[in-house]
Image: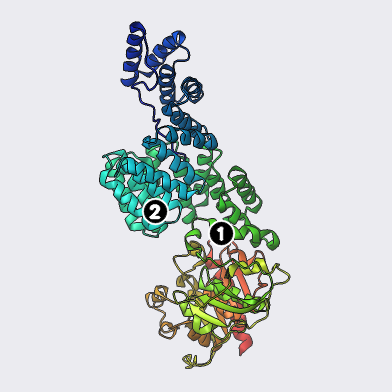
Amino acid sequence: MRRQAKAEAKPQSPGSVVADEATAEAFRAALGLQQSGRLAEAERAWQVLRQTLPDHDGINMNLATVYWRLGQLDDAQEACDRAAAANPGLAEAQALLGAIAQAQGNDDAAIESLEKAVTLKPELVTAWVTLANLYKDREAYDRARECCEKAEALDPGRADVLNTLGVVQQAADDWEAAETAFRRALETAPPGEPVAQIQTNLAALLMGRDRFEEAAQCCRVAITAQPRYAQAHNTLGAALKAARDLDGAEAAFTKALECDPAMAGAQSNLGTVFGLRRQWDQALACYDRALQMNPASAEAHNNRGNVLHSIGRYADAKAEFDRAIELDPDFPDPRFNRGLLALMQGHWEEGWPGFAWRWRTPQMAPFRRPFTEPEWDGAVRPAETLLLHAEQGMGDTLQFIRYAPLAAERVGRVVLECQPSLVPLLAGMPGLDVVVGRGEALPAFDLQVPLLSLPGLFGTTVENVPAKVPYLHVPAGADVRLPMDGDGLKVGLVWAGNPRNPNDPSRSAGLRSLLPLLDVPGCRFFSLQHGPPGDQIAEAGVADRLVDLRPELTDFAATAALVDQLDLVISICTSVAHLAGGMGAETWVTLSQDADWRWLRERDDSPWYPTVRLFRQRDLDDWDELTGRVAKALRERAGAAT
């Protein structure tokens, strides 16, 4: 949101004095009207004076200030230009010209005028603050910090200066310094809206660090300070949504709209709540209303595209992403989402460039590694060491580690940094010279690349996927044994993924949906489910028919050893599915209708895994029908095994 700077010009008449007493009296009367807020009358009074003294800098400066306060920017600029022409050394005129240019969207002119203002009169605190915001928007963070330091030196502890410093530090990814600045600002902030604004800014910062409860509390303090401050309610909704309190988020976004019915961002955010609940019609209605409020909202077009993608209206989704990019070419989300859409449709050469925008999205940007070593471009570097680093979930690591041997052919040595629980499984894999867990000290390296960038670097298409399996193997010494009592097809089950994954509500089926499988004769069932979702076994009362293997699942080497002893793995889209597929084990993957891009669409096989069979929802969120088909296939598979 563009901040409108307060004009530095004061109504006490900067500029030259008026000579004759009659004109001076009229000047004082006009100034009194201006100071008392009677702006329309003040405008007429200054206009009368300007007829007598058309080029008087003080008259034009005050008239410009009145126009500024009335929101008549073109008239304000004309009057201010006159004042500056009459008195080139009038710093207040340059400061107001800068504020006007910023409000008009002409940041180049704004910076030029404001730099003149602070050169002429370095004590103009607000001009320094406005410059800091402008330089921040240009990502010129060092100069923005300098401007804040100049302002703070002039007025130590001033709340709006420290608030701006916090915003600058946050934009520069100096999170600790930003938090310090916001908290210092709160020490001196006047009650009411200033406190509300700073608390809301602090809340946004805390959200970026996954401190959602603290962020929500800051918003509540802001709302106490200014109950109808719409942005505080909007940010509270975002914090509650991130904490999965969807009812609370809906209430907060609704309150934001009550405070500001034209707040398109809150309307769009409300749509995301309905989207998470998979209430698609309500979500689309919110985005339609947001676009009625602001047709140029790239965010609303992007969010609308996400819903259309989820419900299978792919051409319409692409049109929304295209429109969002047209409106805001630097907005990363629609570029990333358009890339995902192309990948899902099998247009991988088109999709990889968009996929690379993931690092600029708010979800991924905080996790981008601050390496000083250059990112590998795929070139042959036989004398150099390459660091491959995991970037997302463990399933992603297991899927894309297949590229390590290909990378090893182009560089001297390959180091992998991955999730600690994967180290025992991947250590010793061909193509990897060193494997370290995330958080451990890294050996020296010359180049680095995120693991999921490798498919694009190698020009991967649906036709040339490196799909030779197995490329994952049970490590020596992983001697975990499957309970062997009884006969029958040994089937492993997984029904839930990591709840922190934003797509988990759509991909995780829950054990209840799989219970009909336990009635298939000729099978013995083993749970490969990690974590709390494994408690559903006891809750469903099926512990006598489904063996809970969680005590044995100490790491992925142990999981691999158990998979190796099974005849079949049935899993949702999660890490175990990729482990089993990479091992060449027979694997059935159950997918939501809006499944992840890697599974493509309208096919029951996978170019990534030759031994994987896909079962897709025919209707959105209908796991029961899908399970019926899986049960039928399982009966056939069990019968063939006897």
Query: Residue 329's spot in the image, x, y percent?
Result: 60, 47
Residue 273 to residue 230: above or below: below
Q: Nearer the viewer, residue 599 or 537?
A: 599
Label tally: 2
Query: Residue 601's spot in the image, x, y percent?
Result: 65, 64
The residue identified by callout 1 is: 358
Secondary structure beneath label 2 = helix
Q: Residue at x 41, y 39 (%)?
A: 128
Query: Which mark identifies residue 540?
Result: none
Tell me which corner region of the image, top left, top right, bottom left or bottom right, holds residue 337: bottom right
Q: Residues within 10 Å of mark 2 (few under 14, many from 20)?
A: many
Pick whichever of labels 1 and 2 is earlier in the sequence. Answer: 2
Q: Amino acid at mark 2?
A: Leu
Q: Is residue 245 visible?
A: no
Residue 420 to residue 598: above or below: below
Q: Residues within 10 Å of mark 1 (few under 14, many from 20)?
A: many
Secondary structure beneath label 1 = helix
Query: Residue 449's spot in the image, x, y percent?
Result: 58, 69
Query: Which mark identifies residue 205?
Result: 2
The Cα–Cα distance between marks 1 and 2, rounded to whole angstroms, is 20 Å
Q: Quadrant of the C terminus?
A: bottom right
Residue 520 to residue 336: above or below: below
Q: Residue furthest right?
A: 463
Q: Residue at x 52, y 56 (%)?
A: 361
